[in-house]
Amino acid sequence: MANMIFTNKNNISPFLAVWLAMNEYRNETRPNVISATTLIRPIRQVVLARKYKDLSKQADIADLVSSRMGTALHDSIEKTWNQEPAILKDLLGQFGIPPAMLDKIKINEPVENIQEDDIPIWVEQRHEKTVKSTSGNEYIISGQFDAIVSWRVFDNKSTSVWTHIYGSNDKKYAEQGSIYRWLIPHMIKDDLMQIEHIFTDWSGVKALQDKQYPQSRILSKTLPLISYVDTEKMIQDRINKIDYYLTQDDSALPLCTDEELWREKDVFKYYKDPTKLARSTANFGTEAEAVSRQIKDGNVGMVVKHPGGVKACKYCSVQNVCEQYKQLKLTNQIKE
């Protein structure tokens, strides 16, 4: 594991700082293991992280709050569902599950013990499969699902309201769930996965004012999984690319795409008076719209393109060794 150097710019108490830092010491130590969540990251990020794994990394404790809260949520749910089945079934009964159905629920039972009419529930289990690259190198794909309920995989996500509304991570979630099914198709038989969004920025006031705004702090969303065959192709393709680029110079690495960079949309700013650039006359989403306004005003002034800011690099663990990041920062495209 890389050496982690922690800073504490906000003077968080040592009591909480140790708790936040501990999340960074749970990393896998086997060199050929790639987790499901890592596999769906940009190829550039995955390769650089593996090539420079022994370099010291720096993180400020305050920046680890979100990831640590997510881990704490998973730990808490796992602890809850490892209680005595009788206690869990009693609580399920209080939430409307009829007695006849409660008798069929099997919690964390080995899959070979599940009967045809049983309702299996499995929580926080890790599974692995080995994949060979085209060059013959072996990689272990590892994945730990949050829960499987009646053959459907569930994933709990602590996230923003807008991530739920716009579905900005839906593709990534579906890929992750599909990898889980590829790992254990005998346990995940449903073609849909269920995402449980727990909002970190939910506002009760906004919910009252806007009925289109989520009316609860927790909402579910179902997503279709990728077919088993296509998932296997996706995994093999990414393993082949990772394996290949690990042997290449960094300059050969594919650049992260705008989607992977979380790039915002470009803005075309129209300035009617070019001597007053402190504030634009109007902003447009396309150059054609901006030029149209310029022509309408007598073809005066100028149109300036402002590239959309990049947000993902701020959270990337390999930014210090990434030339693409350095170039984006040099051209002021990193959004803080």
Image: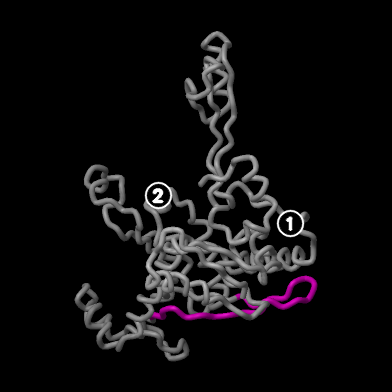
Calculate the distance from the C-alpha at mark 1 to the C-alpha at mark 2.
Answer: 32 Å
Q: Position of residue 165 (x, y in %)?
A: 39, 49
Q: Which of the 4 image quarters holds residue 291?
A: top right
Against 296, residue 119 (above or below) is: below
- Pick whichever, 291 or 278, lies toward us: 278
Q: Which residue is mark 1?
A: 253
- Looking at the image, which residue sits at the far bottom? 113
Whether residue 236 is visible:
no
Residue shown at 34%/54% (left/top)? Answer: 201
Q: Which residues are magenta?
A: 121-141
- Pick whichever, 242 or 301, lies toward us: 301
Residue shown at 35%/57% (left/top)? Answer: 200
Q: Which of the 4 image quarters holds residue 89?
A: bottom left
Return the mark for residue 265.
Answer: none
Please, what is the three-letter code of the amino acid marked with disc 2? Trp
Q: Position of residue 208 (x, y in %)?
A: 22, 46
Callout 1: 10 Å neighbours few (<14), some, many (20+)?
many
Callout 2: 10 Å neighbours few (<14), some, many (20+)?
some
Residue 127 forms part of the magenta stretch: yes
Q: State how the image is colored.
A: one colour
Return the mark for residue 162.
Answer: 2
**For numbered disc 1, what is the local secondary structure?**
loop
